[in-house]
Amino acid sequence: MKAKEIVLCALFAALMGVGANIAPLLTIGGVPVTLQLLFAILAGGLLGSRLGAMSMFAYLFIGLAGAPIFAQFKGGLGSFISPTFGYIISFIFVAYLVGKLFECKQSWFSYAGAGFLAIAVNYIIGTNYMYFAYVYWVEAPAGFSYVLAWSWMVAYLPLDIGVTILSIILIPRLQKAIKFKPLSKRLT
């Protein structure tokens, strides 16, 4: 890896830590409200699939090593059993898939598709992990079910759609502002 790539990965790992703790006391259904999805989409869109996923993996590794950079200033190996840990895992896949879509085609349609795919991947991995964590590791709230776990996500959907739209607007502008050449254009 080049020094610039290492710095960019570290920058997005740090941004994830900041985005995780923007609103540390606001939770819905046991899931904290964060801006992590925004930074995961931006990482994939600006850095590409490989570097975007690496930056999210660095964030995961730093948090598991004990740095309090996960939501609500948590960190350490105990995070594995947290019901929200699946969302952290999903950010690696979000950044990778968004990066892949942006590498294939640069258009508003591909940006929108990548953003909404990001929400789907985040919800599928995160919500399923949350359900299994509540069922097997953590005491589930009264009346907890698979349907209830998914119904909690309805409260987050407007925020995530807004974050996705913001990322769709920001990525092309940031690429232009920093004279960033998307990976697909660097390969040709």
Image: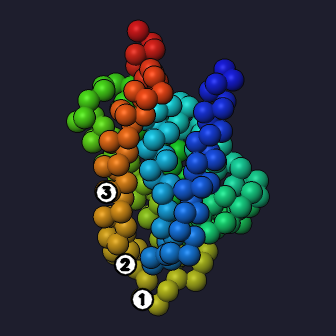
Looking at numbered disc 1 in the image, what kind of residue is underneath it? Gly
Q: Quadrant of the C terminus?
A: top left
Residue wearing tag 1: 143
| Residues at marks 1 and 2 touching, judged by CB atoms closer than 8 Å | yes
Q: Position of residue 137 (x, y in %)?
A: 61, 74
User: How far separated are the C-alphas under marks 1 and 3?
Assistant: 28 Å
Q: Amino acid at mark 3?
A: Ile
Numbered disc in front, either 2 or 3: 3
Whole-Å distance between the Cαs marked 2 and 3? 21 Å
Crowd around label 2: few <14 · some 14–19 · many ≥20 (10 Å): few
Look at the numbered disc 1 and give the secondary structure of its residue. loop
The dot on residue 117 is: none
Provide residue 12's location: percent of width, then percent of height: 58, 42
Residue at figure coordinates x 50%, y 31% from the top left:
47
Circle 2 is placed at which residue position? 148
- Badge number at residue 161: 3
Query: Picture coordinates of residue 129 (x, y %)?
Result: 50, 63
